[in-house]
Image (cartoon, grey):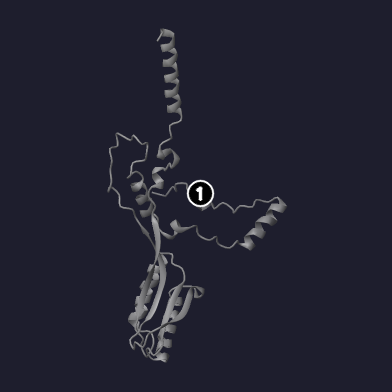
């Protein structure tokens, strides 16, 4: 074989090799790319927070009233939603005593500051149990934090160009731990209704060319007071 033929054969071989490199499939990490913050998710679950009250003939007792007060404090801190009072039925405790205790629980909740429209009174089947209690509860959201530091790989080598398996776990766990109300992770809160009166006042001032913002409080200027020594 002549030198010119060898050169042509070498050129063809080199071109084929370059073409093979150009058509090589991309790694899986490119087609299924993930950022570190997408590897771990703080799961939010709703669990019932309940208190059980024994049925008394005279109605709600003093101890039960105090327990409901502490229950409302926890409900308020958790920014809880509707509270359900479940009274036993079906050959359970005396119906009159059940009504007095359940109604006393509802009145106590209202006295502790729970809006009446957030209180729901329902019944449940006591299955004949004479000591069936009245159940007062609501759904409380809790967040399940991921377990970090379980899997580590060689951080100095990543031939597949994939995200390290433990990256992003600490960020997700820290963010979830700082959330005051885990329900915010499940979805946005509903907006409060618009203040129609304030809106009309602002529009009226706008039409007149007046300042629509509130007046500045001179006492809230933030200036350091000069006290007499």
In this rendering, would 116 be left or right of 151?
Answer: right
> Residue at horizontal 36%, vertical 47%?
171
The residue most toward the front is: 1
Q: Which percent across, then down, holds residue 95?
A: 42, 90
Please indicate, yes or no, whether residue 152 appears anywhere in the rendered image. Answer: yes
Give residue 123's quadrant in the image. Answer: bottom left
> Residue at horizontal 42%, vertical 80%?
86
Q: Is residue 130 above or below residue 156?
A: below
The residue most toward the right is: 208
In this rendering, would 20 be left or right of 52?
Answer: right
> Residue at horizontal 36%, vertical 45%?
168
Q: How many marks?
A: 1
Q: Which percent across, then down, holds residue 196?
A: 64, 62
Q: Which percent across, then down, holds residue 102?
A: 42, 83
Q: Nearer the viewer, residue 173 or 181?
A: 173
The residue carrying pointer 1 sits among few (fewer than 14), some (14 to 19) or many (20 or more) residues within 10 Å by Cα, namely: few
Q: Nearer the viewer, residue 35 or 80?
A: 35
Please indicate, yes or no, whether residue 181 appears anywhere in the rendered image. Answer: no
Which element type, helix, strand or loop, lies under badge 1?
A: loop
Q: Which percent across, then down, holds residue 148?
A: 30, 49
Residue under numbered circle 1:
221
Q: Nearer the viewer, residue 83 or 202?
A: 83
Give residue 46's quadrant in the image. Answer: bottom left
| Quarter of the image where the N terminus is located | top left
> Residue at horizontal 42%, vertical 71%?
138
Q: Is residue 162 above or below residue 218?
A: above
Q: Nearer the viewer, residue 7 or 151?
A: 7
């Amino acid at each position: 074989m002549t030198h010119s033929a060898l050169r042509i054969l070498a050129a063809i071989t080199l071109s084929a090799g370059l073409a093979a490199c150009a058509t090589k499939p991309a790694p899986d990490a490119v087609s299924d790319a993930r950022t570190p913050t997408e590897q771990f998710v703080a799961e939010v679950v709703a669990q019932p927070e309940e208190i059980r009250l024994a049925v008394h003939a005279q109605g709600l007792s003093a101890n039960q009233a105090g327990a409901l007060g502490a229950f409302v404090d926890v409900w308020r801190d958790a920014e809880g939603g509707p509270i359900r009072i479940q009274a036993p039925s079906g050959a359970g405790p005396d119906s009159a005593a059940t009504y007095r205790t359940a109604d006393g629980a509802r009145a106590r909740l209202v006295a502790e500051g729970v809006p009446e429209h957030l209180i729901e009174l329902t019944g449940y089947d006591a299955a004949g149990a004479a000591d069936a209690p009245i159940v007062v509860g609501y759904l409380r959201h809790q967040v399940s934090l991921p377990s970090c530091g379980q899997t580590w790989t060689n951080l100095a080598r990543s031939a597949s160009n994939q995200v390290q398996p433990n990256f992003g776990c600490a960020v997700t766990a820290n963010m979830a731990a700082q959330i005051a109300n885990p329900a915010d992770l499940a979805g946005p809160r509903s907006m409060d209704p618009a203040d129609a009166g304030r809106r009309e006042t602002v529009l009226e001032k706008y039409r007149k060319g007046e300042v629509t913002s509130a007046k500045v409080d001179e006492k809230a200027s933030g200036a350091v007071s000069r006290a007499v020594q």
